[in-house]
Amino acid sequence: MKRKGLYFLIALALGGVGAVHAQDTTAPAPADTTTTTTTTTTTTEGIASYDNRWYIAPTVGGYYNDTKRDTNSRQFYYGLGFGTFLTPNISIDAFVDRTKRDIDNGPLKGGGHNNDNSWASNDYGVAARFYYGDWNAWRPYLLAGVMGAQHISSLDHGWAPAVEVGVGVSKTITDSTDVRLEAGYRYDFDDSSIPNRNGFGDEFLGLSIVSRFGAPAAAPAPAAPPPPPPPPEVKCPNVPPGTIVGPDGCPQKVVIDLRGVNFKFDRPKKGETNIAKSLAEPSADSISILDQAVDTLQRYPQVHVTVAGYTDGVGTAEYNQKLSERRAQIVYTYLTSHGIDASRLEGPIGHGMNDPIGDNSTDAGRAQNRRTELQVQQ
């Protein structure tokens, strides 16, 4: 290979990197970032995590030639790629490269030492690379390409198809520059350069400097936070202190419903303190309702309630009055034993058979009337 070509390619690579650096530091940011078609995301270190700007990739490397070529086993090559990233993990390059192979002392020369005879190979193709890992790390990749190989020698001046596969590793150096190092295998379907020999497989090793065009796109501005919701309209401005109010500022009625807390017939007995034994089955359901009432009273410490007990219509009025008082008392004791201050409770009060909520002529109606209520004082 002529060293002038190698020196020219190295100079081109270094010059391209220098030009990109100069453009990055001098080019002003675009006034309207919505007009750019570049896809880019910037990390906290300022290096793009995905960039689909077009790039050039000057390449230098070496061949380990197929021994069937009757050439020296090793030659340099140089080339130039032009491409872009289709996704963060896939790039596509159109490329051209060239090598000059020196003919050795093989059968075409009849033995003897090397001489100055040589032949050239120019390759024009397209290559895809499939990357793995984070953009800013050392990223391994797979290479696959197809090309047309032009052979220029004293015996032939023609074309043949060729393919290549390989592996490599890439690293982003700046937001506009990558370095690629790759090794691979090319198979040239040449059947004319050397008589009676068809197809050649060459190994190669290449180094490329990838330089992207233009300035990187500015990171998108963060979305503005949504405005805070307007404060609720106060419809009732003159509410007395201590009144329970809703979101609109108006008095809110607090209801503590003990419906479902029903007692067994003729319970509790005199002196009975375990409320679970007095409650209708399943008693766990009634206990759960009582616990919800405790929670409501704890969340509204300004609420005061009257604890009132009731009975069904079976029995005398005098007996049922005492029974309703015992029912109110056992619920009153349950509330105070679970943290509700007695100063917030009125009673306990018994109403006997008064104010039934169910039909006393049926079992279901009588069960509803054997109850205790928490009557909120507004």
Image (spheres, rainbow, N blue to C red):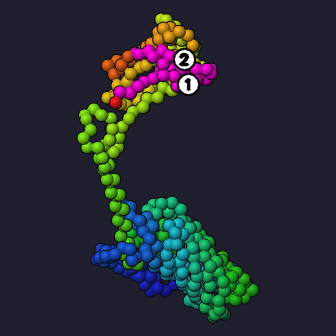
Horizontal and vertical percent for residue 23?
Answer: 33, 78
Q: Quadrant of the C terminus?
A: top left
Whether label 2 touches label 1, CB < 8 Å: yes
Q: Which residue: 49% across, 75% down? A: 84
Residue 168 in view, yes or no:
no
* 156 or 319: nearer the viewer: 319
Q: Which residue: 30% across, 34% down? A: 243
In this rendering, is residue 352 above or below 378? above
Q: Is residue 359 rendered magenta in the image?
A: yes
The amino acid type found where label 2 is placed reads Asp
Measured in 3D between alpha carbons, the distance from the residue under mark 2 to the one under mark 1, in whole angstroms, is 9 Å
Horizontal and vertical percent for residue 371?
Answer: 51, 20
In this rendering, is residue 156 above or below 296? below
Instruction: Indicate which disc, 2 or 1, sits on the residue closer to the N terminus.
Output: 2
Q: Is residue 152 rendered magenta in the image?
A: no
In this rendering, is residue 190 above or below 281? below
Horizontal and vertical percent for residue 15?
Answer: 37, 80
Question: Which quadrant of the figure has residue 376?
Answer: top left
Residue at the disc numbered 2: 312
In this rendering, is residue 200 above or below 134? below
The span picked out in magenta is: 348-377
Residue 336 in view, yes or no:
yes
Residue 184 shown left or right of residue 85 in the figure: right
Residue at the disc numbered 1: 358
Question: Which quadrant of the figure has residue 331?
Answer: top left
Element carrying mark 1: loop
* 119 or 278: nearer the viewer: 278
Horizontal and vertical percent for residue 86?
Answer: 52, 72
